[in-house]
Each structure stands twice: as C-alpha cells, then as structure tokens.
Amino acid sequence: MLRNYFKTAIRVLFRNPFYSFVNIIGLSLGIACALIVWMYVVIESTYDKHYEGHENIYRVTSYFTIEDKLDDFALTSFGIGRLMQKEYADIERVTLLQEYPRTLFKNEEKSFYEEGFLLADSNYFEVFSHEFIEGSPETSLNRPLTIVLTESIAQKFFGDALALGKNIQTTHRTYEVTGVIKDLPQNTHFLFDALITPSTIANPTEDQLIRSLWNVGSFTYVKMREGSSTAPILDNFAAFYDKYMAEMGKRFNANFEIGMQPLADIHLKSNLKYDRQQGNINYVYAFALIGIFILVLAAINYVNLSTARSALRSKEVGMRKVFGAGRTQLIIQYLGESIILTFIAFILSLVMMEVLFELTDFNTIIGKDLHIAQLVSSELIIGMIGILLFISLGSGLYPAFYLSKIDPIQAFQAQRMNGKAGFWIRKVLVSAQFIISISVVILTFLAKSQVDYLQNTDLGFTRDNIMNIQVRDTIVYNRLPVLMKELENHPGIAKATTTYMIPGVGVGKNLFRIEGASGMENQTFSFLRIGEEFIETIGMHIVEGRDFDLTNHPSDSSEAFIINETAVREMGYDNPIGKKVEWGFNDDGTVSVHGKIVGVVKDFNGRSLHQNIEPTLMTLQNRPGGSLILRLTGTNIQETLAFLEEKWGEMLPGQIFDYSFLDEQLSESYASDVQQSKLINIFSIVCVIISCLGLLGLSSFTIQQRTKEIAVRKILGAEVNQIMYLLFKEILMLILISSLIAFPIAHLAGEEWLKSFAYRIDMPYLIFGLIALAAVALSFVTIFYHSMRVAVTNPAVSLKYE
Amino acid sequence: MIQLNEISKLFLTEEIETTALNKVNITIKKGEFVSIMGPSGCGKSTLLNILGLIDTPSSGEYHFNEAPVHSMSEKQRSVLRKMNISFIFQSFNLIDELSVFENVELPLIYTKVKASERKKRVEEVLEKMNMMHRKSHFPQQLSGGQQQRVAIARALVNKPALILADEPTGNLDSVNGEEVMEQLTKLNAEGTTIIMVTHSSRDASFSDRTIKLLDGKVISENQTVALHA
C-alpha cells in the first residue's frame, strides 16, 4: 500500500513538472529562510549562555539621579562590586572589566594594532568559564602585566609555537602571556581577543573604594551563590547607599541606585549608556515573525496549488473510493505526498543554505557566522523538525481532507467541478500572501529610508572628508604643532587641529556646577574636551559669543566653556555668555576649576541618532593624546594620503600611520541598524519571490480552467487586451483589497519601530502607494505569459481542448 | 455571400499529418440554410471553424461578402467576425459565471454598444426566445433546452448576417431539439443565413441544402427533402 502511495506521489510530481517546480522551489525557499531565521534567533537569544552557571552571573548597572535628572550607565564605579561583596553574603565573586583603547602590540617579529583587548582583574576566571589551550585559570591574570590571548590572536602573534611564557609589548609595557583560551563564540556580549591585567593590581583601601562610587568607568559582574536571588540586594540597597554614598549625594542633591542584569539578558534587553553594540529584541521578534510569514507563504502556495488541482485528481480519488479506499487511507496518502514534497524541498533548502553561507557574502552582511553544521545543535534540531512538521502538516492537511472528501459520483464529473470548490479559500489565501508581502516590503523600504536618514542627516557638523589620526603617544603629541603646519601647506588639506574627544565617537558625561536662575546649580552635561580650532575644522557653527582663542585669551586653556543650544534652553538662559561654570569636584565638595561660558554652538548630535541631543558643554583639552583631525579638501584624496604617510614617516619615524575617516566611524553607530535592514531586505525579497511563484502557479491553473470561457469570449468578439484585462481584473481587486488591509498593519508596525529613534523619518505614505502599484505591476508580469498565451490562442483549438 | 476555393486544412502532430479538409469548394448564398453532414472526423467542425473565422485554412481562398478573408490579418478577421457572424455550439458554451442576461449581453459589449441600447436589445431577444423570465439565472440553473435557447439568443443579439451552428441539438432531447430547429428555421425565414453541422438527417431536413463531407472532401451537395411537418 505504502509503495503504491509513494509511487503515485512521485508520478504526480513528474507528471506536472511545472507545478512540482513551483511547489518545491517555493517550499525550499520558505524552509531555507525559516531555518536561517531560526538559526539567527537561536544565536541572538542564547548570548552568554555558554558560561557555566550563567544563571547566577549578573552585571551591575548604575542609575544616577542628579537634580531630578536620571542617567543610566552600563558602567559602574570600580569600588561598588567589592563593597557589595562585603555587604551581601549572597555575592560569591566579583570581577571588573574595562575597555582598553586601540593600541599597537608587538613581539619580536610582528606588530598589530589591536582593539579587541580588555582590561580584567584576577577574579575574571572565577566568574567566567573558558576552555584553556595553554595555561590554566588559576595561574592566569594573577599578577600585574599578564595577558591571556584567545586562540586566533595567539596564532596571529606566535604562529603554531607555544605562546605561554612569551611576551607581548606596547610602547611602554611588556605583558607576559599566562594563558591561551579558545576563541569566544560569536554569541557573547563582550567579545574580546585578549584580557590583560593592569600594571599594578590595585588593592585599594575601603576609603578609596568609597570615594570611587560616584565615578563610573568599569563593567562590574557578580556571581551569586547558587539558589540566591538579587531581590534582597536590590530591595535593601537603600541601606548600602546610606552607609557609603548618602553624604556625597546630599552635597550634589543626587541619588544613586543599582540594577542587576542577568548575564543572558544583556545582549537583547540592555539599552544603557556605554553599552557595547547591542542586539535589539525588537529585531529578533521581527525576524521571527518574518520567518513565520515566509513559512506561511510557502505553505499557502502548496495549499492553493493542491486544492486548485484537485479537479484533475478527482477521478483518482473516485476510483480509489469505489475500489474500497477509506477516507483515512486517502488522508494518509495525501499527507504522505506533502511529506515527500517537503522532504525534497528540505534537501534543496540545505543546498541553498550551503551556497548562501559558503559562496556569498551573506554572513558578512548579517554580521553572523552561520554554517550548515550548526543545524545539528539541539535547539536547532528541534526548530528544524518543527519547521518541517509545520510545512508538511500545515500545507498537507487541508488538501488531504479536501481531496479525501470528494464524492465519487461528483469526482467522475471532473469538468463540472473545474476546481471551483475551495475557490474562496484560495482567494483568501492569495490575499493573505499579498497582505504579508506588501506589509513586509513597505517595512523594508521604511527601514532602508530610516537607515539612509541616519547616515545622511545633518548632524550639526561635517562628517565628510574628516580624517582622524589617533595620537596615543606623548612624543607624537609634542611634535604635532610642527607637523600640522607642514600638513596645512598641502593643497589637499584644508585644516589641521587636535582634539581629545570627537562628537559621535566619544563623548563623556560629567557633573558641573553652573550658574542658573537661582545661583549655582549641579547639572550633568554631555562633555567634550576638544582642541583649539576644532569647532571650525569640523564645521560646527558658533551662534553666540566666540570660539576658543588661546592667543587673545590665554585663560581659555582651562576657564572657557562653549555650550550648545540645547544647554541654553535647558538652563533657561536669555544671555548665556559670561555665566559661571565650575567643576573638578574635590572630596570636600569644593571645585578646582572656575570658568565661564564664552560661546554657544548650533546644536549637533554628539551621540547616535537613536538618542536626543543632550545639553553639552565643551572645554579645551588639557592633556596630550586624542586625535589629530584633518579636514581634507576632498580632491585627490589618494595623493593626499600618500603625502601624509610620507610626511608622517619622515617626522615621526617608527610611529605607525593609523587613520580612519569620521564618516566611517560614525557609520559604526548604525552598523547594527544597517545590518538588520539588509537582512530584512533579503527576507522581503524572498517573501516576494515565494508569493510570485504561488501566483504564477495558481494563475496558470486558473487560466487553464478558464480556457473555454476565454475562447467563447474571443468568438463573441473580445480583443486580446480585453481578455488580458479580464484575467488580470480579479488579481487587481485582490491586490487593492490586500493593500487596504496591509497599509494600516505596516503603518502600525512602522510607527512602533520608528519610536526607537529620537530622529526619524516621517511615515513615507507615498511609498505605500508605490509598493501597491509595484505589486500590481509585478503580478501582471507574473501572470503575463500564461494570460497572453491563452489570450492569443486560436479559440477553435481551445474549444477542441475542452 | 461565402465562396470557398480549394480550401485545405492540415493538422500536424509529432508523428502524423492529418488532412482535415482537402481542397473544398463551396458557395453559399445570402439567406440560405445549409446543413453539413458526414461521419465523425470528416472535417465538419473544422470547416465550420474556418467559415466562422476562428480557424485559418492551410491553403485556398475564402471570400466573405466578396472580401478576401484568406489574406486578412487576425485583427481584421476578428472585426469581420464580430460584425457579421454568430455561433451556436452543441455544448452551448455559456459562461458559467455570468447570468443569462450577461451571457447574451457579452457580444454587444465587445462591439461597444451603449449600455441602454444593450439592455433593450438583450431583453428583446430574450423575449423572442421566451427566456425573459430566466434572465437573472445562471447557466447551471437551466435545462439543456433552455441553455441552448440562451445560446441562440446570444447568437442573435448582434443581428448577425450569418449564424454557424455546430450540432445545436446534439445535447438536447427530441422535444427541445425540435424547438431549437424551429427557432433556426424561423430566423432563416427572417433573412439570416444559417450553416449547420449535424449528424441528424432530421435536423438537416430543416435546411435548404445539405453538403456531405467524407475524409475532408465534399462528396455531394443535395437540395434537402423536408422530413418534418
């Protein structure tokens, strides 16, 4: 019996190669996309779960309220962890991590700029578990100036030789390799290439720890005792505050609370200042939804084609019933067919995925490292089986019940049926496809427009042709004035200056005491230390007062401040120039810097456009380091670069010329948005392809069903264009109705997504209309071939066929 | 009205070449009622399709009202057909999705007759065919005889000069068949030229002349002897 079913299934496939092709390709695309989405969602939702006991590891976060304004930070002070461990017995271990700036590392033979290194303390491996290739957790990071490398960095510096015990140097320090660990999996929120211990292992006094509590700079992770909860700590934190922080808090009219984020939640759920580039749970939901949509689209194609073609198989059903087949047997037979088809489609989908992962830039585009082999992991296998069951049962059940229901007498009068049964269901399903596809395509365009807007909108300063050369060395810094003069003589360089911080790349946050309506007030401001002439170089506009000017105002070096328009508004100033600013708080509450506001710049975006412009205060940098900033004229950049490199080598021998362009650096803030937008783009194309395949199969079938009608109409005088219109009219109506349903869905989903941006585009309603028109055009193209063929066929032939 | 000279039609399939019509010469005058008879596969329907301009001959000349149809484009033939020729089929070929009224109205839509005029003419012809009371029904809701009456109404509504009927009683019982033949005779009496393909000698007896085909050739042309009252 089973053999007979199998044979029939295979023969049905081969007897109708066109429908089989449409079905299998549609299903394969659907399965491939759903699997990729599932892999993506699994990776996104399993961040940091590879760490042993991750359920007990938490990141401590900071919430400062100063003058009723709340600031949240992923960073904490370096002292809070240890003091918490002292106060709360449930905290078993504490470790601190700190970002380490991009630095030149070298050994005897090789030197590389590295930016993926982190500063860690000796407790790191007591909190986080890693597999060691060389060395051991106990002997790593246990003294100053040691380094633990990941496998690939060890390979980069030492090749296949043993790295343990060897040295890696920066300009001023030498680090001893005390361990080599396996490369980190991609799904960890603090990916690093190496961990280094600082030059001195701080063993601070309690007093030092307490004094640090109001300054953030480290990531603090705590490991809780098995079975304990964070609730008692969070509920009783007021006691901790009163004991260690209240005194200083009163002085600044400030308050402080902590948060404790479960390790596995950080990637998707944290959105705090100084968070590393994060995932976005909304994107994960969106992708999961798109994955389901694509599966539904593919299943709809199968249901539509199977039920539409039921008339062609009704005789077979009738015969089987007449000769004794029960309904259950028929259901099993037709379900079996959909399982066979799904299986073939599944094999093809694996081939598609392998090609996509290994032969295209897909992994780079989505910023993940996906491989077919990962499907073997437990979460993915469950998902894969789920997807295959959904497709084969979801798409096979209705046709199976539908076909098995056919009455034998009715079945023998096949042409009376003409596939009209299930007609409305097919219309509803095709409309569902249009609704899904139109909504997804609108949202794709919306995401793309928003990302374009982020990348191109006026930030209040120039981002094009601004070159940023990192200066991490005092020797280089001291020679900069001479170098800058030389550089400015080159026609390709319009302006040269230095700066310690760059808007959009690195902006600080500080507490200031500033003159307000009722005297001096404590206020937090975004804060930039910049070089003289930086404002002019980067194209910011002074709207009131003046720029920093050391020649005429030597005291500007420490006593002058420039604020932005938002700060003026927030402070309620009519005339901000000359208002007093104090900062540099001492332990006794006095301040070390007394200055005043000398100018106001037009508002600019100092952070990503996800956030609103903040009140910002700028002062001149008083320390070496930062960046050499060059504004290029934009003509002949290659030649200018060659000149720069030559000049750099000539004046700073032995110093590597390491530069970046500001527009590229700024784009990194939106890398995740760009990536997601690209991924949505790919999926929406697949949605459209699957829908078109379905439409192609279904229209070819319905047109075939209407051959007689078309012939009669032609005989009665219908022209080819009238026939074409007749055939297309129905789809046109479906698209119009579907668009009317898809528009509000896309609108609501789009508005929800745009809410996550402080700066956003207006809802592009024109795009809605254009996409509906495009759907009409694409549908027309899709059904054109079959329609045209039947429209130009000699009606005598069509009637004979009937 | 119709002049066929040496009309042949070949059908090519992958393996064989079939001659459906072999150098057929026929002349039909305006106002005639002609029957075409012959066994299955002799080329009757092919001849009718060529006469009706829905199929083209492989060779030979066809003049319709002295116009050389054989050298016309598809579009010209379509216009000529639309303005002059109507069809009645054995299987009625009504469009299931359209009501009786809409089926009959269809040829008028394609000849761009105004809506008010269409309504008048459709009602007129349905009245004539005694189908007015069924105008909102759909083909499946009618008996075979009624369906054929609708098909005749559809054929008449454009006031064609020529009606081509392909076994119009083939799917009907004798009472309904008789009724249809009477309608055709009546139309012919009113001046419409009718060419009818039939297997039935009785049906053929309603016509003025019978052309017999065998293997694609005309084997005889006889004046018909009336078999009916």
Image (cartoon, coloured by chain):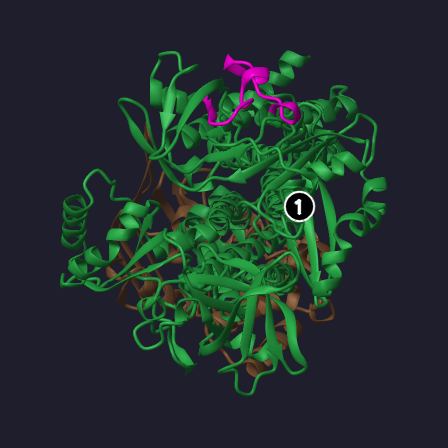
Chain colours: A green, B brown
- Residue A427 visible in the displayed image: yes
Circle 1 residue:
A269
In the rendered structure, does residue A513 fall within the stretch colored magenta? no
Q: Which quarter of the figure is the N terminus of chain A placed in? A: top right
Q: How dense is the environment of label 1, judged by Cα within 10 Å: few (below 14), some, or many (20 and up)?
A: some
Residue A307 sits in quarter: top right
Q: Is residue B200 above or below residue B161?
A: above
Residue A387 image offset from top left, x and y in percent: 64, 31
Q: Secondary structure at mark 1?
A: helix
Q: Residue furthest bottom?
A: A574
Residue A56 image offset from top left, x and y in percent: 74, 30
| Residue that appears at 39% across and 31% down | A173
Q: Amino acid at mark 1?
A: Lys
Residue A416 sits in quarter: top right
Q: Quick check: A485 left or right of A550? A: left
Q: Which chain hosts label 1?
A: A
Q: How many marks?
A: 1
- Residue A419 visible in the displayed image: no
In the rendered structure, does residue A139 fall within the stretch colored magenta? yes
| Residue that appears at 51% across and 60% down | A446
Q: Is residue B210 above or below residue A164?
A: below
* Residue situated in front as seen by the camera: A13 or A110: A110
Residue A101 image offset from top left, x and y in percent: 43, 42
Q: Is residue A750 above or below residue A218?
A: below
Residue A614 image offset from top left, x and y in percent: 56, 67
* Residue situated in front as seen by the camera: B162 or A567: A567
Query: Magenta residues?
Result: A125-150
